[in-house]
Every structure is written in structure tokens, then in C-alpha cells.
Amino acid sequence: MRSRPLRNFEAAVPLLVFALVWPTPAQGQCEPGWSPLGSGLELQQGGLISDMAVFDDGSGPALYIAGGGFSVNGVPGHYIAKWDGFEWSTVGGGTDGWTLVVTTYDDGSGEALYAFGSFTSAGGLPARRAARWDGFGWNPLGEGLIRGKVPYLYVATVFDDGTGRGLYVGGGISEAGGVSVSGIAKWDGVRWSDVGGGVTGSLSAVGGLAVFDDGSGPALYAGGHFTWAGGVPARNIAKWDGNRWWPLGDGVSAGSVIPYLQALTMFDDGSGPALFAGGSFSQPVHFMACWDGRSWSAVGEPLNQRVQVLHSFDDGRGPMLYAGGRFVRAGTLRVNLVARWDGAAWSNLGAGLGDARAGVFGVTTYDDGTGPGLFFGGNFQTAGNFAVPGVAKWGCVRGDLNCDGVLNGGDIDPFFLALSDPAAYQTAFPSCNIQLGDMNGDRRVNAADIDPFFICLGRGACP
Ligand SMILES: [Ca+2]
Ligand SMILES: [Ca+2]
């Protein structure tokens, strides 16, 4: 009688193994790690990657970076560039001055890439601080934008106020297409318009935008540096419902330093969707706070310097919130400019980004063929153990066939197994992604990947 439960257990073991192994998709996860993005981009002194976006010009989705002070394939003086997963290239002549924001928007004629910055022309055509790239050519957005009290453009996002999807641009803006605006403007594909009187204060600038539903319907939330929104007192953050502006409690503020809110995103950390805000504020808490629709709260242990970007990303283990900025610690944990929030605690992304005087200014999700990864932009010069030009990937590492997060000698045998017997590889490494063996980017894993594998192996990453 005593042996019966044991036999039952033994009988259950094969079923348990079956249940664990077979539902696992062939395109498995990986241990994420840092990777550089080729070798065609170089950051000069004072150079910076300020924003990034994914756009498909017809030849496949690619990563576009905005900024300035960088060279593309040895040619300096570029302000926008494209990474297709393997190579850097320029974008139709680009702009004649810094681009600060890139985002995609469909005005009804198809999705296009929109760039905003301190330029006066794009692709040789006059374009005042705003331009549209459709994959073939650049076009201005009406008469463009005129700067306000600060010269910067910080953010652009798409929101439907009930009259159709519009592209909302935030920054130091005082005029858009001949219309007087303050800190924020809307482009509908044809013309610019004011957004309920905009934001006003000593700087009158919007630095972060996000769409969030607090239970009363989706609305556009704007953070930045202002004391009024549409005539309503609102400290550095406000809600636009399509008709009027609303404050968010007492907002955010700071004592002696200039408070500035520059990162906003919606995220559900398990306790319901909430709006997460980052910036250089100190009230109600330092640098990062969470608004649930009624009140503000802290987000775990405090970060020690300002937050400049926030982005939700699922690496296969559930959605988590990623923060980037100028902080190097979360509580006592060393994180180095980037950190991950799982709803309970902060964790680091390996050794993070460096150096400590640098910052992260942009982040987006992009699939370079090895699965979705997080791409960070800024003026940092290291990512983990790699020297990088202000841009780096956190995700599956190409060539990492034993999926431990690094490309090294331990990947040689798994690589050749993947080449010679994909089924045996998938059995031996059931949670790994065989596509990481595509070293030449043709989306196939075969003998043509052997030479590039050893070139990448020699450098610890693909050149
Ligand atoms: Ca490895
Ligand atoms: Ca290949």
C-alpha cells in the first residue's frame, strides 16, 4: 500500500515532462544581454542620440535615431540615421540641423516617419523644425513650428480626441503653422492647431506625452514645465480630454531646482493600469512617481537622479517597466542609467550603461530578426563590456546559441548543432531561439552563417 503513491508519482513524471517541454514554442526566449549596433555609427564630442522610432519604408521595419553630432559610415554631420539590424544608412539627405524627436503617424495616406528638431530644411526642401519622411522623400508640415521660451522639442505622440487621430508635439513651441500655441500643438495631416490654450508658466514647455485611461476614457496626459494648462492651475502635469485640461492632484514640483517632467507612460505592474511619470522633480517623491487616477505614489526604492525615459517591454517573462536617465542607483542597487521595475522591486540590466556623466534620452522596442529587443539612445559610451556610440541593444545576443546572454566559446558547439540538426538543437536547448544563429541576417541558419559567426565570436558581438 505504501508503494502506491510512489508508483502514481512515477507514472506522472513523463506526463509532467511532456507538459513542460511540448508547449514551449520553438522560438524560445533567451537570457538578455547588451549588444552594440554594428560599427557604422560614431558619436563625436558633444554628440547625442535623443530619440528613436521604428518605421517600415517598404524594405522592412528599421530603427531610426534622432540627434546630432554623429557620423554615419565615416561621414560626419548627420542628424538622423537608419539601422536595419545589420547596417547603418542615411535617410534621404536628412535634415540640416539637430533632430530631437522621431515618431510614426498615419495621417490617412499611410504611415510615415515624422521628425522634429532645430532644422530649417529636410532633404534640401525648406522645413521649419518639422518634417515627414515617407520612405521616398521629405516634406514639410505646413509652415512648421516657431520656438518658444526654450528651443527644444521633446516629444510627439498620437492621440484620438474623438475627431480622429492627431499627432501631438510637445516642447518649447510658441507658433505652429501660423497659429499661436503654447508648449503643445496638434498636426492632423493637413494643418496645425492649438490644444485648448496649451500650457503656460515660466518655460511653457511640454516634455512628456502619453495616452492613459483613468476610468473616464482615454485622455492625453502632458508633463513638462508649466503652472497652468488651458487656464487651469496644474503643476507640471495635466490631462487633456479633448475638450479641456485637468490637473492631477497637486502635480509634481521641486524646491530650488527647475522641476521638469519629461517621461510619461502607461503601465500595469499588477495593481491595475497607472500612469508613470519621470523627471527632475522632488515632490511628491524624487524623480519618479505613479498616478492611479486619484493619487500619487512612489515607485519602489528611489532612483538617485532624474528619469528621462520610461518604456514598457515584455522580454518573455511578462511586461516590465524600463526606466532610463541620469541615475546610477535604485536604492542601494547599482544600475547605471537604466533599471527595470517588475511591480515589486528594481533590478539592473547587467552592468548597465556608462559613463556616470552620460544619460539615456531615448528608448524603443525593435526586432532585428532575433526577436524583440530594447534599444536605448543617449550619450553613453559603454553598454555592459562593449564600447558603443550612444546607442545599444538589450535583448537576445546574435550568436548566443546556448542563450546565456553572452557570445563566447560556449556557443560554438550549440551553433554547429543548430546548423547540422535543428531538431536536435531544439531538443538540447528547448528554451533557446535557433534564429540567433542567423549571423548574416538573411533569416536562415545555414553554412553561410559560419564565417560571420567566427568574426562575431572574435569580438564578442557582431561588428
Ligand atoms: Ca552564449
Ligand atoms: Ca543566415
Image (tube, rainbow, N blue to C red):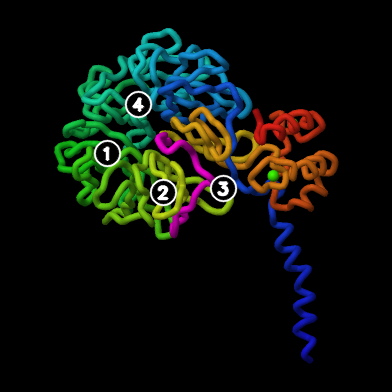
Quadrant (top left, top right, bottom left, bottom right) of the N terminus: bottom right
Q: Secondary structure at mark 4?
A: loop
Label 3 is placed on what type of residue?
A: Asp
Instruction: Determine which residue is flagged by label 4.
Output: 188
Disc with the residue nearer the chain's start (2 vs 3): 3
Which range of residues does the magenta coloring cover? 341-360
Q: Secondary structure at mark 3?
A: loop
Which residue has dot 3 on it?
315
Q: Say which amino acid is labelled 4.
A: Asp
Marks 2/3: CA–CA distance: 22 Å
Closer to the chain start, of discs 4 and 2, is: 4
The one nearer the camera, 461 or 14, is 461
Name the spot of residue 173 as percent of width and height, x first: 26, 25
**Residue named by callout 2:** 329
Q: Position of residue 324 (x, y in %)?
A: 42, 41
- Mark 4 or 1, nearer chain start: 4
